[in-house]
């Protein structure tokens, strides 16, 4: 393997793949993409329904979890993160939303206003071509009709999701950006290459060290796209972060940047489980023929239950009954377990509701300088009690929605927590059961740890481009925004590289 390139991109996830494609298009640089995990060439990634096998996977999921958090009664919460080409976009549910235009206005970052960002999304969508889910379960279609309108976080609405699938298969940033970029002949992708630290000399990032001791050099610079959990961890291990915290761990200070690791947040969410004789995809005797025929149907038509991303439909609701949504619903036409196991026998459906714009903030820090040790993740869930109250109202709104007549043919009773869980007991239930939508962001925030061109404060030739740079979370799912950040951010990075070449 060549040990010196012009640019190193760390992480081949949703953003890193888009970064690579833009650098390959806009510069003549050689690019080395270092991905900690393996290739994504496996059926569980390509077949949409395979995602049930990927969360918690021993090698394809980083399987992170939070510290015990007071807002959730001292519980730890799971933080799944994809670990392979495509990153979290290779284990996610493929739901596609840009977010609201106002989300980007709220960022208040030059070059990231809603019009500019919308144009970058158009470029991303040309590469990915998101489209309505090809073959939703009729129950999801019925749920989607509960409010109707075009499903968008801009208005109170419901519908079947648009997803990033092509011909019934997952089509991730690795497919839409990385593989085409490799055809330039200037991009080398190295899998199973986990970066331990960055090497910085005279204030300039010039190389990385892998956990197996290999060192790879970058003449023009390094882009960190390892996601909202691992990107700040790499910076901190490299001495870029709050000086006192680093000194405590015996890490030499490269740049005292207080905001690295701060501002970590996610969409808090809680599910309602429905179980009964009716429902969507079931694990029952009468469903066995459907499951037996599913592989043949999928091979022939790319349709049927194996083409399902599970999270098939959704809604945007307003907690105060107004026109502006502040809640997102994900609807799964299947009974999921609420006592540990995800897939359980029986029929039913599951819907979860999430707070679109949470106010709570946590922090990512290190417990050790050892790159094999997991970072300490505090998502800060419900630190701001208004998030809890919004979610409580969200459960009530979701129950109203699930009572609509369009679902009557499929109706199954709320089995957990049950309709009598209201008021204080509902708030306690939320603290005991809430998780997140798996959308961590903000831990290397723009205007905080990086500038609006994504350059890391205090170190030259070093940028961060992934979901970690969001100053505040977008109002819906974060995969499309992560790709947009990679693509648009790499426009700035390409300019910087060309200027200093
Ligand atoms: C289970 C799940 C379901 C989700 N569902 C949806 C959904 O339906 N729709 C949606 O919009 N969003 C969804 N998301 C969120 C979305 O996928 C993420 O927001 C998005 O992928 C983040 O992109 P990223 O580039 O910031 O990070 P990632 O895509 O996570 O990429 C980071 C990459 O860096 C690699 N990496 C990390 N550390 C190192 C290191 N030290 N050295 C080398 N490589 C490293 C990782 O292995 C990974 O490949 C979901 C996420 C999960 C986990």
Image (cartoon, rainbow, N blue to C red):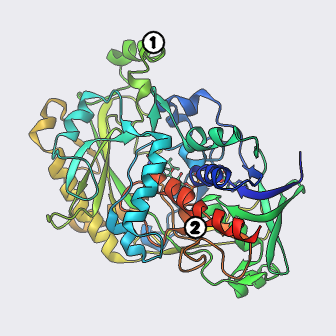
In the image, residue 83 above or below residue 486: above
Q: Position of residue 291 (x, y in %)?
A: 42, 17
Report the mark closest to the observer, 2 or 1.
1
Q: Is residue 336 among what the camera can see?
A: no
**Marker count (numbered):** 2
Q: Circle 2 — which element?
A: loop
Q: Which residue is mark 2?
A: 67
Q: Position of residue 105 (x, y in %)?
A: 37, 72
Q: Nearer the viewer, residue 266 or 280?
A: 266
In the image, residue 494 above or below residue 138: below
Marked residue nearer the N-terminal end (2 or 1) = 2
In the image, residue 1 above or below residue 295: below
Q: Residue 462 falls in which quadrant of the image? A: bottom right
Q: CA distance from mark 2 to mark 1?
A: 46 Å
Residue 300 - label? 1
Q: Position of residue 73 (x, y in %)?
A: 44, 68
Q: Position of residue 287 (x, y in %)?
A: 35, 18
Q: Residue 15 falls in which quadrant of the image? A: bottom right
* Residue furthest out toward the bottom: 244
CB of mark 1 near ligand 1 (< 8 Å): no
Q: Residue at x 59, y 27 (%)?
A: 43
Mark 1 crowdedness (10 Å alpha carbons): few <14, some 14-19, many ≥20: few
Mark 2 crowdedness (10 Å alpha carbons): few <14, some 14-19, many ≥20: some
Residue 115 - label? none
């Amino acid at each position: 393997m060549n040990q010196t390139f012009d640019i190193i991109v760390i992480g081949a996830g949703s953003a890193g793949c888009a970064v690579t494609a833009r650098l390959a298009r806009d510069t003549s640089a050689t690019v080395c993409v270092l991905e900690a995990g393996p290739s994504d060439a496996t059926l569980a990634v390509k077949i949409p329904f395979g995602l049930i096998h990927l969360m918690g996977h021993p090698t394809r999921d980083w399987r992170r979890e939070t510290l015990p958090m007071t807002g959730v009664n001292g519980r730890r919460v799971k933080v799944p993160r994809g670990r392979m080409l495509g990153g979290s976009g290779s284990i996610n549910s493929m739901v596609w939303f840009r977010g609201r235009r106002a989300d980007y206005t709220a960022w208040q970052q030059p070059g990231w206003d809603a019009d500019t960002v919308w144009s970058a999304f158009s470029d991303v969508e040309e590469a990915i071509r998101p489209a309505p889910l090809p073959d939703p379960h009729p129950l999801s279609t019925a749920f989607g009709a509960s409010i109707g309108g075009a499903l968008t976080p801009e208005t109170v609405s419901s519908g079947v999701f648009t997803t990033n699938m092509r011909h019934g298969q997952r089509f991730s940033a690795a497919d839409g950006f990385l593989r085409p970029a490799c055809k330039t002949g200037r991009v080398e992708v190295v899998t199973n290459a986990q970066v331990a630290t960055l090497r910085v000399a005279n204030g300039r990032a010039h190389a990385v060290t892998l956990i197996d001791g290999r060192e790879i050099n970058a003449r023009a610079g390094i882009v960190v796209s390892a996601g909202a959990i691992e990107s700040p961890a790499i910076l901190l291990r490299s001495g870029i972060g709050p000086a006192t915290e680093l000194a405590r761990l015996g890490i030499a200070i490269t740049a005292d940047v207080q905001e690295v690791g701060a501002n970590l947040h996610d969409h808090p969410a809680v599910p309602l489980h429905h179980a009964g004789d009716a429902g969507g995809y079931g694990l029952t005797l009468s469903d066995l023929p459907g499951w037996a025929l599913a592989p043949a149907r999928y091979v022939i038509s790319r349709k049927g239950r194996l083409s399902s991303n599970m999270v098939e439909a959704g809604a945007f609701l307003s907690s105060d009954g107004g026109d502006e949504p502040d809640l997102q619903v994900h609807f799964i036409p299947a009974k999921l377990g609420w006592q540990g196991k995800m897939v359980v026998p029986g029929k039913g459906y599951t819907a979860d509701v999430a707070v679109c714009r949470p106010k709570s903030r946590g922090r990512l820090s290190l417990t050790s300088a050892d790159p094999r040790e997991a970072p300490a993740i505090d998502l800060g869930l419900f630190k701001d009690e208004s998030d809890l109250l919004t979610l409580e109202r969200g459960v009530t709104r979701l129950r109203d929605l699930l009572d609509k007549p369009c679902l009557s043919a499929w109706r199954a009773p709320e089995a957990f927590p049950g309709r009598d869980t209201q008021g204080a007991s509902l708030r306690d239930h939320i603290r005991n059961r809430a998780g997140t939508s798996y959308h961590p962001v903000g831990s290397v925030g723009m205007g905080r740890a990086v500038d609006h061109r994504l350059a890391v404060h205090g170190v030259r030739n070093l940028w961060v481009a992934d979901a970690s740079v969001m100053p505040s979370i977008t109002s819906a799912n974060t995969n499309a925004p992560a790709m947009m950040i990679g693509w648009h951010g790499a426009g700035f990075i390409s300019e910087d590289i060309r200027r200093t070449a």
